[in-house]
Amino acid sequence: MFLTQGLQRAVTINPGGASTIFRDRRRTWAETADRISRIAGGMAALGLRVGERAAILALNSDRYLEVLYAVPAAGAIIVPLNTRLAPPEIDFILADSGAMLLLVDDAFATLPAQLTQMAGVKQVIYLGDGPIPAGMMGYETLLAEPFTTDSPTGGHDVAGIFYTGGTTGRSKGVMLTHDNLVSNAAMMAPAIGYRHDSIYVHAAPMFHLADGASTFAITMVGGTHVFVARFDPAELLTEIARTKATNTLLVPTMINALANFPTVGDYDVSTLRVIPYGASPMPDAVLQAATRAFPTVQFLHVYGMSEASPLVTAMDRNITVTGDRAKSCGLPCMLIEVRIADENDCEVPRGTVGEVQIRGPNIMRGYWKLPDATAAALRGGWYHSADGGMMDTDGYVYIVDRLKDMIISGGENIYSAEVESAISMLEGVSEVAVIGIPDDKWGETVHAVVVPKAGRTLTPEQVIAHSRTQIAGYKCPRSVEIRQAPLPLSGAGKVLKTNLREKFWAGRAKQVS
């Protein structure tokens, strides 16, 4: 399989149908496919060779979609960059991936001047519509190159590297192959009910695979992509009404913002059919408010991760579930095996909590330049998610805890080790532990417990301000506890984060949102 198979199918079954709608710009599938081929040719003319990397740092747009296909069509590897990262984090990814091209839009056109790890980047390409910044090349210039056919890469070849937060304090590049992404799209389409008349709004950021799951699926069925640059309730509601959208993908915090938007009732959202959501279960109050605001919508809980391209489970859209089962993240999707295993990788009885392990054609090839981490994550032929979960007698999966120190806040994965590493660089810090604490709006927020060095004084404001210079704002602690006593340790010398969490999660059935 190769990624552009879905694109070719869209042109075959719906050549004159709308492929993309971005503001006042509309294109057909025939036009989009032609542009992607030419852009691939233009990148090849710039020296982008098979297996080389091209990074993109931009908000959602039709051009972002074109780049996601054009880079693999040229035989190269796309590296989407999180738009919320701080410059040091972007520096690391550019250096680690060895990106040869960097594509930026108006929102990030001034950023390259702030970066230090640009030695490997041969050309910066401007995706915006304004005057081309000095030293950059205009995106539309790429179209002048001759038409090119697809590269022979495909199958087990890497199509994209998607960086996640790192449990060891550095980001890890998840290598996803053509087979991974195509198989995920083939599973996503029937799970959500995407078809040729589906109109999908990209409201979640396109660098994130939560949105990517639908990106390639909508193309495969010959549907229509609509784009809002970034999530904004008014803009999203306007686009849904204007384009008669049928689908979008959101996290519960976004759904909550929409459902409680003061003028939500003024917008015609009657065309919406299904909205998959993930990252965390939907609080009952949010689901009730969302159902009132969007009476035609079926909200579908899905579960996944970058390493799985990302879809793993989904609720059956043809079955209405109630009671405790509504807290489930659904059934394993087609082609995917899920088991719950103990510390020896032996499957546990149904109803028993263990680690969620996954096997299927959607599982990553591995972590970029991290063979040991790859071997550990994929040992025995199963991807070890480090999510604690259970499976009931009918195969429904429930996530109950995280075995790794990961916090999910507003749909973003935040690894405590990465935040701890940033805080530890502040002069005067002796010890630091970062945990997730419950939050009604975000599900969880980041909380830091800091022990100053002897004779030093630190304030929460100092810790937060320092963090913002090192890592993305969404990863920074929202609250900080300064304590003089040492952090509690296990016999093996590990910080007992369960003890630190206890007072925040008291009275709750699980220490995860």
Image: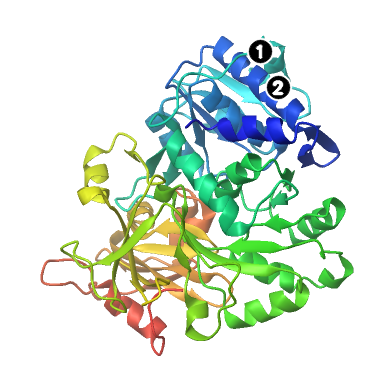
Q: CA distance from mark 1 to mark 2?
A: 8 Å
**Residue tagged by mark 1?**
147
In the image shown, does 146 or 203 lie closer to the viewer? 146
Residue 480 is situated, as x and y percent measured from the top left of the image, at 43, 70
Among the two numbered marks 1 and 2 on one chain, the one whose residue lies closer to the N terminus:
2
Question: Crowding at label 1, few (<14), some or many (≥20) Cα neighbours within 10 Å?
Answer: some
Question: Crowding at label 2, few (<14), some or many (≥20) Cα neighbours within 10 Å?
Answer: some
Residue 314 is situated, as x and y percent measured from the top left of the image, at 51, 63
**Image point 18% across, 72% down: which residue?**
489
**Residue tagged by mark 2?**
34
**Image point 64% across, 69% down: which residue?**
299
Residue 24 is situated, as x and y percent measured from the top left of the image, at 86, 39
Q: Is residue 394 left or right of residue 366?
A: right
- SS assignment at label 1: loop
**Image point 75% across, 49% down: which residue?**
197
Residue furthest to the bottom in view is 507
At label 1, which amino acid type do we have? Phe
Q: Kindly check if marks 1 and 2 are in contact, taking CB atoms under 8 A apart as contact.
A: yes
Residue 173 is situated, as x and y percent measured from the top left of the image, at 39, 40
Can residue 437 be seen here? yes
**Image point 53% across, 68% down: which residue?**
315
